[in-house]
Image (cartoon, rainbow, N blue to C red):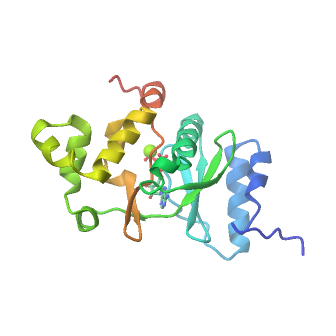
Amino acid sequence: MKYIKTYEYFNVDELSNLKTFKQRKDFVQSELVKTGMSTSKYPQGTARKIYPLKDNKVLKMAKNPKGIQQNLTEIEIGTDKEFSDVVSNVSKYDEKGNWLIAEKAIPMTEYKFEELLGYQADGFFYWLRFSDGELGKFYNKQTFALKIKKMIEKYDLDRFDVAQITSWGYIGNRVVLIDYGLTKHIARKYYKVDY
Ligand SMILES: Nc1ncnc2c1ncn2[C@@H]1O[C@H](COP(=O)(O)OP(=O)(O)OP(=O)(O)O)[C@@H](O)[C@H]1O
Ligand SMILES: [Mg+2]
C-alpha cells in the first residue's frame, strides 16, 4: 500500500510542493477522506481555512496573501517560547507561510473565560484596547493580561483583533489565543484600517 503514514495522517510536506490554494485544498480533502473524515463544514475565516488533524492539532491553510502574512506572524509568535503558555503553539509549518500546524483549542465563551481567569472578557478586552486608568489598577497586576499586552507590543499586533472573543480558545485550563496573526502592518495593508 502506497499510503504515506505520518503523525498527521498524511505527509504535510507534500503541501509545500503544490502551487495553488485549490491544489492544496483538494490534496488535504482527499487525504482526509481516506481517513474516513467528513470533508464538509471545516471552519474558515477571511484568510485561512482550518482542518482538524489527529493528536489535537489543526492545519491552518492560507487562502490568499492575507492568510500567508498572518500565518507568517503566527509561525513567529507560535514558536516563541516566551508566549508558549498563552497561544495555541505552532509545531510544524511551511517556510513561505502557506500552511502551519497548531494546537487545537475549543472556541472561547464569555462564561469559560471568566471561569478560567477570574475576570470578565469584556473588561479585559476594553483594557487591551484603551488601557483605561481605572481598569489599569486591576489589570496591571494580572500576569496573564500583562503577558498578552507584552505580546501585542513585541509583535506590533492589531490590539482590536486580539480584543475579540472569537480570537480566543482554551486547551484544558489554558486560555489561549488562536487567531494572533494580524499585525498593524497587515491590517493597514490588507484590511484598510487607518490607525
Ligand atoms: N487553533 C485552533 N483550534 C481550533 N479552532 C481554530 C484554531 N484556529 C482557528 N480555528 C477556527 O477557525 C476559524 C478561523 O480561524 P482564524 O480566525 O484564525 O482565521 P482568519 O482567516 O484569521 O479569520 P478571520 O478573517 O475571521 O479573522 C476560527 O474562528 C476558529 O473557529
Ligand atoms: Mg483573523
Taking depth in this image into account, of 195 and 131 the one nearest to the observer is 131
**Left or right: residue 46 compared with residue 40:** left
Image quarter of residue 169: bottom left
Compared to 40, does 45 lie above or below?
Answer: above
Q: Position of residue 52 (x, y in %)?
A: 57, 65
**Residue occupying the point 68% across, 62% down:** 29
**Left or right: residue 18 compared with residue 73:** right
Compared to 15, does 107 lie above or below?
Answer: below
Q: Position of residue 137 (x, y in %)?
A: 13, 44
Image quarter of residue 129: top left
Q: Position of residue 103 (x, y in %)?
A: 53, 61
Q: Position of residue 90 (x, y in %)?
A: 57, 53
**Residue occupying the point 23% across, 55% down:** 121
Pick the quarter of the image with the C terminus.
top left
Quarter of the displayed picture in which ligand 2 can be seen: top left
Residue sitting at the far left: 134
**Residue occupying the point 15% across, 37% down:** 132
**Left or right: residue 112 compared with residue 133:** right
**Residue occupying the point 71% across, 69% down:** 7
